[in-house]
Amino acid sequence: MRIAVTGSSGLIGSHLVPRLEATGHDVVAYVRRDPGEGEAFWDPHRNAIDPLDDFDAVIHLAGAGIGDKRWTSARKSAIRSSRIKGTDLVARAVAAAPNRPMLLSSSAIGYYGDRGSDVLEEPEPPGDDFLARVCVEWEAATEPAAEAGARVVCLRTGIVLDEDGGALGRMLMPFKFGLGGRLGAGDQWWSWITVIDTVRAIEHLLTSQMDGAVNLTAPEPVTNVEYTRILGDVLERPTVIPTPRLALNALLGKQLAEALLFTSARVIPSRLAEDGFEFSHPELPEALDALLNQAAR
């Protein structure tokens, strides 16, 4: 396939592009700087994008980082606009392409909001907090492509685990020094997926017939208490020092801390399972062991 990718330098994109190229696909990274060889240009702030003609698929991963900075009003506006404007631009370019390439567009399990221990499958309604409202608009921005007849998949991605980045990368240092512990009460559900299985799931969806929302999470979500215990076991370190909720709210800002660390979403990848996708790492102990230990053996 000939595949266009936005967000190619991000956590998922930096693993996805080499994998697609290694399996024989022709990948063109869409970048916001001056494009180099084998790249193309786009800039949602300038409403500019090179045509998506002659592509079989577009994988749209770009968006301002959710947890990179405190959530000021300006930062929240940037988070929202980068997703809505960028996705609308890509979707309209897909609609304008003569062959209507399929569009696999990022979303997030933030769509569901804070739902306690409820089991969440794709038909569940959205939540009503900031991230949930952003995700609803984010997914709706793909409509020009769908209305033009393209197959559109919204990738509701969970907590992506990778030893060099994302949530796991940030947590490793204190845990390695025996300073890790549960966050607050620790009863919040974390729906995770390894970056390896994220890439494999996207590959699977390139050749699937599914459209609409698809949860990209492992089939066995865990509470923060369980996550903490398992990570400590894998690293062979104690996990007895809890981090108070108030301390994290002060460190990160209450809105960001609540959204990233304390929102509870017990998400199940029902549609992936129904479509025959098999996870390399369906359970957290083996996933963390593969990410943190096996490469060193």
Image: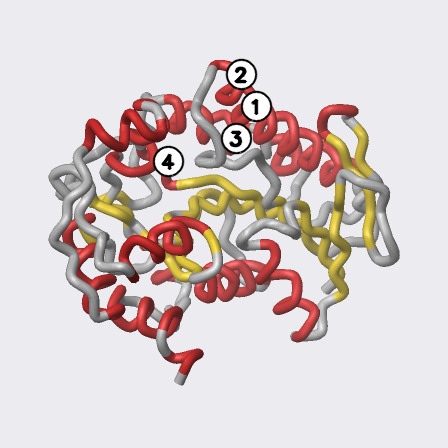
- Mark 4 nearby-residue class (10 Å; few <14, some 14–19, many ≥20): many
**What count of labels does the image hold?**
4
Q: Name the residue type under label 3.
A: Trp
Front position among marks 3 and 2: 2
Horizontal placement of 193 versus 12: left or right?
A: left
Q: Which residue is mark 3?
A: 138
Colour convention: secondary structure
Position of the N terminus by quadrant: bottom right
- Mark 3 nearby-residue class (10 Å; few <14, some 14–19, many ≥20): many
**Mark number displayed over residue 110:** 4
Q: Name the residue type under label 4.
A: Gly
Q: Are marks 1 and 4 in contact (CB under 8 Å)?
A: no
Q: CA distance from mark 2 to mark 4?
A: 20 Å
Q: Nearer the viewer, residue 125 or 293?
A: 293
Of pointers 3 and 1, the one earlier in the residue sequence: 1
Q: Name the residue type under label 1.
A: Ala
**Mark number displayed over residue 74:** 2
- Residue at left offset 76%, top offset 38%: 32
What is the residue that sits farthest to the front in this orientation? 177
Q: CA distance from mark 3 to mark 1?
A: 13 Å
**Residue 199 coordinates in the image, percent (x, y):** 52, 62
Q: Secondary structure at mark 1?
A: helix
Q: Are marks 2 and 1 in contact (CB under 8 Å)?
A: yes
Q: Which residue is mark 1?
A: 78
- Residue at left offset 57%, top offset 43%: 105
